[in-house]
Image (cartoon, rainbow, N blue to C red):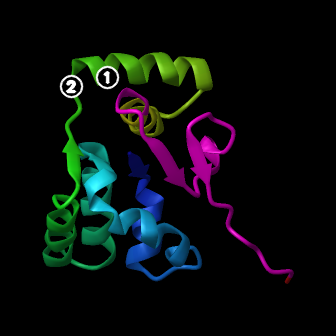
Amino acid sequence: MVLVDTCGWIEWLTDGPLADAFRPHLEQTDVLLVPTLVQYELAKWITRERDETLALEVIGLTHQARVVALDTSLALGAAALALEHRLAMADAVIYATARAHGATVVTSDAHFEHLSGVTYLRQHTTPG
């Protein structure tokens, strides 16, 4: 199982520098988890940056994968992980969801870089 963090979805949607690295993970919908929190972040970002119609279309795409709702068990697990790893709420919920389902988090968010069970895709910077 794999869980692509919100930043990976945005990279793919905007054809960003890491889009090709995230694409294979997003295309394997039979093993892809999508937390409802990622749906929230995507809907908010796409509506703000583009429009609500596109946001709803993308949320429809997420339903090709396995959508995982935040429940009490995940919330409590996320709280413990937030304290243990000094994670913000959204990152803790995403990480807890992945761990609860035996999934690998695929991300370019540096907050996850040194956590176990994470595939961290480093943004390449070019010298200015």
From what the image shows, is residue 20 above or below residue 62?
below
Report the amino acid beneath label 1: Ala
In the image, the segment drawn in magenta is 99-127
Q: Quadrant of residue 70?
A: top left
Residue pictured at 47% horizontal, 39% vertical: 91
Residue sitting at the far right: 127
Residue pictured at 23% horizontal, 56% vertical: 65
Quadrant housing the N terminus? top left
- Residue 15, given in percent of the width and then of the height, sits at 46, 83
Q: Quadrant of residue 36?
A: top left
Q: Pointer 1: residues within 10 angstroms few (<14), some, or many (20+)?
A: some
- SS type, badge 2: loop
Q: Nearer the viewer, residue 57 or 28?
A: 28
**Can you identify the residue that label 2 sits on?**
71
Q: Nearer the viewer, residue 38 or 31?
A: 31
The answer to whether mark 1 and mark 2 are in CB contact below 8 A is yes
Q: Quadrant of residue 37?
A: top left
Is residue 124 part of the magenta span, yes or no?
A: yes
From what the image shows, is residue 52 above or below residue 75?
below
Residue 75, numbered label: 1
Residue 23, numbered label: none
